[in-house]
Image: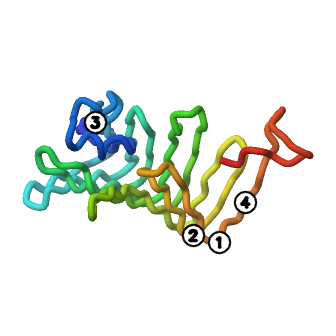
Amino acid sequence: MKKSVFLFLIASSSWAAAQTNPAVVPAAARAATEINSDAADFDLNTHQAVYRGHVRVEHPELKLTCGTLLVDLPTAGAHLSNVVADTNVVIDFNDGKGQTYHVTAAKAVYAYKIENAVTNETVTFTGSPKVETAQSTIESEPMIWDRAHNKFTFIAPKMISREAPGNTTNGLPVKLF
């Protein structure tokens, strides 16, 4: 397995403020991301990187595995705008408040753009996506993670709730997410 190290700025929602003041970028956002795969191609004309085979991404904010990862490489000073993870996508992350999320899907598409002074940063999961926490499991098609607002949107969700010890009201869980 070959190793590639790439400054992969998948940042928290505080990135928007950092566009004008780099001093507010959290250390995790500035950290290099390690990408391991069986093979990789870098097209300097289209500014794209394609990682293939047993792709593993390690970043302080998340861990990702998939079969293929396509990254539109940002130009100097620009924000990462598009990443497509395909085939057996698994993402594990913590919301910063102690809640751990485990997401699986066939495909995940990360998109970042600023439009009319509004930051849009989403990950759209398709292909039988499922998110699991200690409290619940939700399946939805598609499933959208709004990173700018730290929210999930579910279309026609199927949900299984698990009772957390000491966290109930009349036998029903209080916290689902």
What is the C-alpha distance between the residues marked 1 and 2?
A: 7 Å
Mark 2 Cα shell of 10 Å, populated few (<14), some (14-19), many (≥20): some
State the image coordinates of residue 158 (x, y, percent, origin top left): 71, 65
Residue with the mark numbered 1: 156
Amino acid at circle 1: Ala
Residue with the mark numbered 2: 141
**Residues tagged 1 and 2 counted as in contact (Cβ below 8 A):** yes
What is the C-alpha distance between the residues marked 3 and 1?
A: 39 Å
Query: What SS does tag 2 mark?
Result: loop
Q: Which mark is residue 66?
A: none
Mark 1 Cα shell of 10 Å, populated few (<14), some (14-19), many (≥20): few
Q: Quadrant of the N terminus?
A: top left
Mark 4 Cα shell of 10 Å, populated few (<14), some (14-19), many (≥20): some
What is the C-alpha distance between the residues marked 2 and 4?
A: 12 Å
Residue with the mark numbered 4: 159
Q: Is residue 124 left or right of residue 81?
A: right
Amino acid at circle 3: Lys
Q: Which mark is residue 3?
A: 3
Amino acid at circle 4: Met
Whether residue 25 is situated above or below residue 86 in the rendered picture: above
